[in-house]
């Protein structure tokens, strides 16, 4: 069992989640149960899956949860692109979030590859 708080990818995902909550707080109220909720849910699920995978007993389990986190990061990426095209994000927020999502996805892919090589 690993302490998820020691993982750089978890820390990056956590910071991304905080930034998403801040950026989506500016969304129109009528999006609260639509895109705001979807973006927040998918973003929170990235570090949650990393944490849950760390609580499992094997590297294979951790890799499986990291793969779920990567899928959720891709979902978040699409939601962020859509919100940007709808004009819901300020340009600086959109650019920052897309860069951070891309980096988290890269980190997850690297970690998964490492676990599979050890496996």
Image (cartoon, rainbow, N blue to C red):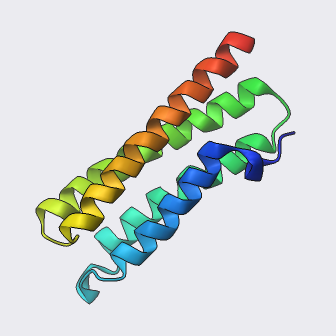
Does residue 57 sit above or below 114 in this rendering? Answer: below
Quarter occupied by the C terminus: top right
- The residue at 21%/71% (across/down) is 90
Where, by quadrant of the figure, is residue 63 drawn? top right
Residue 71 appears in the figure: no
- Tell me residue 118's x, y (percent): 74, 13
Residue drawn at (38%, 41%), measured in percent from left and top? 102
Instruction: Please determine whether, in this image, residue 109 is positioned above or below residue 5.
Output: above
* Relative vertical location of residue 119 with respect to residue 51 in this rendering, above or below: above
In the rendered image, which quarter contains the N terminus?
top right
The residue sitting at 66% across, 16% down in the picture is 116
Instruction: Tell which of 22 and 31 is nearer to you.
Output: 22
Left or right of residue 67: residue 33 = left
Q: Is residue 5 left or right of residue 90?
A: right
Compared with 58, 116 (above or below) is above
Q: Position of residue 39 (x, y in %)?
A: 38, 63
Residue 98 image point, x, y percent: 31, 51
């Amino acid at each position: 069992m690993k302490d998820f708080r020691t993982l750089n990818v978890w820390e990056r995902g956590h910071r991304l989640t905080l930034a998403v909550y801040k950026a989506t707080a500016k969304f129109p109220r009528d999006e609260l149960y639509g895109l705001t909720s979807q973006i927040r849910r998918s973003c929170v699920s990235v570090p949650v899956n990393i944490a849950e995978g760390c609580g499992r007993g094997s590297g294979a389990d951790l890799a499986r949860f990291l793969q779920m986190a990567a899928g959720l990061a891709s979902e978040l990426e699409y939601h962020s692109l859509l919100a940007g095209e709808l004009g819901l994000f300020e340009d600086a927020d959109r650019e920052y979030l897309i860069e951070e999502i891309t980096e988290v996805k890269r980190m997850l892919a690297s970690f998964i590859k490492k676990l599979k090589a050890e496996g």
